[in-house]
Image: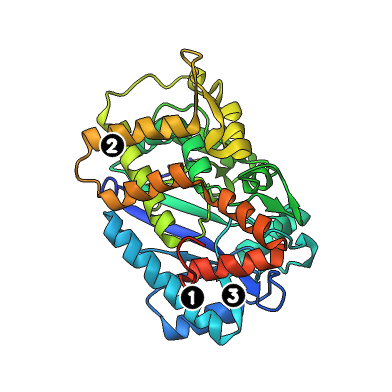
Amino acid sequence: MSETLEFAPSEPFTLGVELELQLIDRRDGDLTRAATDLLRLTQSRYPSLDIKLEITESMIEVATGIQRDHHGVLINLRTLRDAVCTTANKLNVGVCGGGTHPFQSWAERQIAEGPRMRHISDLYGYLAKQFTVFGQHVHIGCADGDAAVRLVHGLARYVPHFIALAASSPFLQGEDTAFDCARINTVATFPLSGRMPSVRNWAEFNAYFEKMRGTGIVTSMKDFYWDIRPKPEYGTVEIRVFDTPLRVERAAALAIYAQSVARLILAESPGEISEDLYLVYSFNRFQACRFGLSGELVDPLTGSRRTVADEVRATLLAIRQNLPQVGSAALSEIERCLSEGNDASWLRARFGKLGALGAVVDDQCARFSASAESDT
């Protein structure tokens, strides 16, 4: 008899945030192979912090502890940033955000050591090295598996918000892609990417998972590269569509925005989970990736259209009206993104001024470490 996939309950709406960071050669702004050395040195200096290897030696992942509010997330992210940047300086390595490196060559990447990394490399071939892209993952605590399934479906409507607000990957292989978020196009090449199927509760999810496990295609939730997925071992729902922002302040604000949306969703009466809710999912997702906050979203039920920015403004209004406990600092950062543009806009503006992508990466490193002027 197959083993049931148990959902470990957690405190609802608690947060965990992960950031995948770029490791930069200070000489030319390209990616460098430094993850193992950086991890070893960082762990010796800051043993309590959650820092780990990612798929290639040119990236590192940091993760917060369990947090409840904006203050906790921001303080934790700043601590992680300072630790990694301080240690990287000892190795003469830069650290920055951004969903893609603007001109690195995937063929030069080196797969990091570890069974999981080797498995991915053996299975996916060159795609594993091309997976040197950088995202922010936000975990939201759920009381049980049924709540997690409901939340995954409810959050699907907001995926374009998350993509457009966090977009920081306009450049790839030395070219302007014309996308605000090109990173997701890389993730989409994996066969188990996309979205969770329209299961209605945790029992149905378990049945689906058992069928997939029976095929031999998957062995754990890690094998699904969905935009949003349940993480039953943590008791969370994990949102995976954010590019890594250029500043931890924006990363913290995005986490609180997602948490607030989750609160709104679970405060509503449960609606019917129908495939119709996903009729325009791929189109709306593309619009956010391609055009960012100017992307046009279609309501699957009414056919009406609004820009991503207008949808975010309406959501911010609902948060203020219904969730007075949400701090103004996080919401102000989201409003700043709406008024001044996302990180993709900032990167294009810097390239327009500097004319060299290597110089843009230098500015990314300065911006991430908070040593640059805030509005340069």
85, 175: nearer the viewer: 175
Of marks 1 and 2, which one's residue comes earlier in the chain?
Answer: 1
Q: Which residue is mark 2?
A: 319
Regarding residue 217, the answer to whether it shows in the image is no
Q: Is residue 111 above or below residue 273?
A: below
Q: Is residue 271 left or right of residue 186?
A: left
The residue labelled by disc 3 is 94
**Residue 96 in view in this figure:** yes
Marks 3 and 1 close (CB-CB < 8 Å): no
Q: Position of residue 119 (x, y in %)?
A: 67, 59
Q: Nearer the viewer, residue 376 or 280?
A: 376
- Contact? badges 3 and 2 (CB < 8 Å): no
The answer to which of 202 and 49 lies nearer the viewer is 49
Q: x and y percent of residue 280 in the render?
A: 56, 23
Q: Residues within 10 Å of mark 3 (few under 14, many from 20)?
A: many
In the rendering, at what x and y percent does residue 310 appear?
44, 30
List the single residue furthest toward the left.
Answer: 324
Q: Amino acid at mark 2?
A: Ile
Q: Quadrant of residue 130?
A: bottom right
For the residues carrying marks 3 and 1, which lies nearer the camera in this image? 3
Which disc, if any, is residue 84? 1
Circle 1 residues within 10 Å: few <14, some 14–19, many ≥20:
many
